[in-house]
Image (cartoon, rainbow, N blue to C red):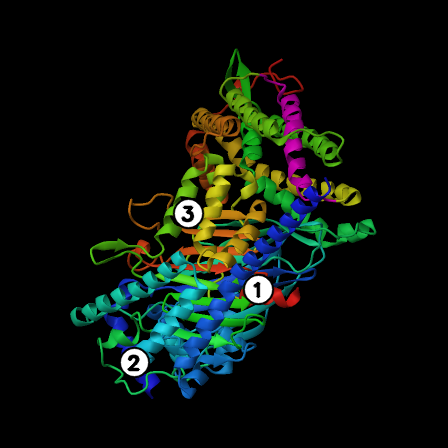
Amino acid sequence: MKRKLITVAAWFLCLGGVASAHRLDECLQAMLVTVEQDHVHTSMRLIPGVAVSAAVIADIDRNGDGVLSMGERQAYAERVLGDWSLTVDGNRLTPRLVSMEFPQIDQIREGLGEIHLEFTADLPKGGRNRRLILENHRQDPNTAYMVNALVPHDNNIQIVGQKRNELQSFYQLDYIQTDVAAPTGWWDQVGGTGFASLFRLGVRHIAEGTDHLLFLLALLLPAPLLVVGSRWSGVVSARQSLLRILKIVTAFTVGHSITLALAAMGVVSVPSRPIEVLIAVSILVSAFHALRPLFPGREAGIAAFFGLIHGLAFAATLSELGLGQWERVVGILAFNLGIETMQLFVVAVTLPSLLLLSRTRAYPAFRVGGALFAGVAAVGWIAERLFGLHGPVDLWVNAVAHHALWVAGALFLVSLVCWRSWNIDRRAATVALDPCGYPA
Amino acid sequence: MNSFPMRTIRICAWAVVLWMSVTVAAQQTATTKIVSAANAFLATLDAKQRKSVMYAYDDETQRAKWSNFPTGFVPRGGISLRDMTPAQRKAAMTLVAATLSHRGLEKVEQIMEGDEVNKIQEAKNQGNRPQGGPPQGAQQGPPQDGQQGPPPGGRGGRPPFGGGGLSADLFGKDLYYISILGTPSAKTPWMLQFGGHHLALNITIAGDQGILTPTLTGAQPALYTLDGKTVRPLGQESDKGFALLQALDDTQKKQAVLSYKLADLVLGPGQDGKTIVPEGLKATAMNEKQKAMLLDVISEWAGIVHESAASARMAQLKADLNETWFSWSGPTTVTPGNNITAYYRIQGPHLVIEYAPQTLGGDASLHVHTMYRDPTNDYGRGLAKQ
């Protein structure tokens, strides 16, 4: 009874004063992650501060009877779990609740209650280098997150890196499974998760590697155009444009596939920094070419040449994974297929707009705008990669890239509108072309 | 001719024996002094009090029963200074003092004094402000089962709302509890616990060894004025940590300063026996001067325990230095004369130090929790394995 009185007293007291210095308005979610050979274990402590404790209690005690029934606890734990996603090497895992511990409802109310949840997820077999990502999708502004990895018990697991966003609602853990045996047959690889995840990695590499895309898109900008003197002028037929684009994309693919294979197999080895700088230079070159023809008719050759350089960068991504020799052959195939798929997707999405727009008066403005965007981004990247100068380049390139589908959709709509209103009948102006699509 | 070297050898041998016995005597002095202080303290208690203070050495529940919270929220074991006679209180503080270094004792006294200041401030607030809210939920002792009654030897015969008003039940320099696990001995291990709001000293005495881990120190207010003098109980921790950060070059800083916020202690109360993956800047990337500064920051915790135990501990941590990491999260600036508002952590094979300002609600420079651990030897557990 006395304890209760004191508690009540404490309550009122705190209403008066402690507020000035104590945290009240937050729920702390502290997680400790343990990686084992075949599963990941996460232990979570949920500590609701007093100001949010009533809301937390209401969230658990859904029927409001003042009792946290087993069913309510279970449902709450599942909801908390549902706020998080857990992936390994890009594959979504399904964690299951293995234990939960709830304090007395009064303790939660007082801000003294710690809810303990433990969950485990099985890990599919994978390569030597693995990446675990734990991400909260609720991002409750009243919650502070803390995520840490415990030092693994298993000596064969070496943690090599941890990354978090500022709020710790995103957590990435990279580790090496040092005892992973080489795969036995290629079917295991092709059919296994390794293939799928490397394919996805290839897709993601292009989707997120805006520099590769910017190079290709800048190179495609003048593809539907004619050269008159030292300027872009006039337009070639749709068929010719398509043919040129196909050639450029194929040349780029051939180029980067060659070096990707060579570098990933360890035949050639180039430090990554100059490669990154050269990639930025390649964007600058293709952006300039979109402004004024530098190498008309030789775009495919240029694409192949710079493709060789881009391939070396792709290989760097692949070599970070530390695959074995045989894994590597299959890995290169899967990774490259992922790259091609994403690249084709991007070209397929932008191609119609490009063809339509090129037949309107708006195209010169669009071409110049696009070229300037790519050029400025390239200069920014060069400065960053060469001198370590950090500008806003990544920020705004990513801003565009993050809304890529919307941008592409808007572009298509704009080009439709432009095409309807400003369609120039170029047929009369079409000049006799050589087989490469340039004026004979 | 022969007798000369013989005599020299004999003198040297005596000198060695003398030196060793002096050393051994000095080491024994610390432990034996503590043991006799413990026995003297126990002798002042009546049978009932003694029963409340003494626990079995293997009592894991009592061992882990410490917290940063006021004792009114999370009850501690043992008996409080408030429930002692002046003579008992003096004996208790003599025991605590015997286990600590001079500056360790000073820190402890300033933390306790700070809680007294807190009590007075809270009592004032109580009169003035009827609104606000109860304390935060973060960081507390081990999970409470809700069935613990009032602390043993508790508030016998005292009206619950008497004394300095409501805050008297939560704060004040007399609300610190003492308990002993095992029997005070110069040979077999035993443990002394002393703590309350923002303080948890867990001192394992094992022969000539004195193990202070895990220990929590904290302060609120972390800056106050007493007799016209400004006191910052954990000011050195703040200043030395910040000085180390300042001494790093840009590349080192980039590694040391973490990109994310840390809301609280990662390995606070209830988190015994856990080792997290270290982050930040490894001391191998520091120059000699920076390494010396790092060791100096560490000494603020490692030097709380009495001198001979502290120097053994410092030697161990110095040997570990190249495997030790320093990380920082939060503002990299400080208002002169104030405490930092950033979190920092020092972690090595035998060490975890966390300095965690409580960032939300109020001024983070005025409220700090710190943690000092040895993941391999918290509560002297490593001794059993040897």
Query: Closer to the observer: label 3 or label 1?
Result: 3
Q: Confirm whether residue B29 shows in the render.
A: yes
Residue B301 forms part of the magenta stretch: no
Separation (CA) of disc 2 from disc 3: 40 Å
Separation (CA) of disc 1 from disc 2: 35 Å
Local SS, label 3: helix
Q: Residue at x 74, y 54 (%)?
A: A192
Same chain under badges 1 and 2? The reply is yes
Q: Nearer the viewer, residue A376 or B246?
A: B246
Residue A320 forms part of the magenta stretch: yes
Kind of residue at disc 2:
Val
Query: Closer to the observer: label 2 or label 3?
Result: 3
Q: Chain of mark 2?
A: A
Residue B241 - label: 3
Horizontal side of A21 relative to B311 (left or right) equals: left
Q: Residue at x 51, y 77 (%)?
A: B61
Q: Chain of mark 1?
A: A
Q: Which residues are magenta?
A: A295-323
Q: Residue at x 50, y 68 (%)?
A: B32
Local SS, label 2: helix
Q: Which residue is mark 1?
A: A42
Separation (CA) of disc 3 from disc 1: 32 Å
Residue A8 - label: 2
Q: Mark 3 and 1 residues: CB-CB less than 8 Å, in contact?
A: no
Same chain under badges 2 and 3? The reply is no
Location of residue B218 by image quarter: bottom left
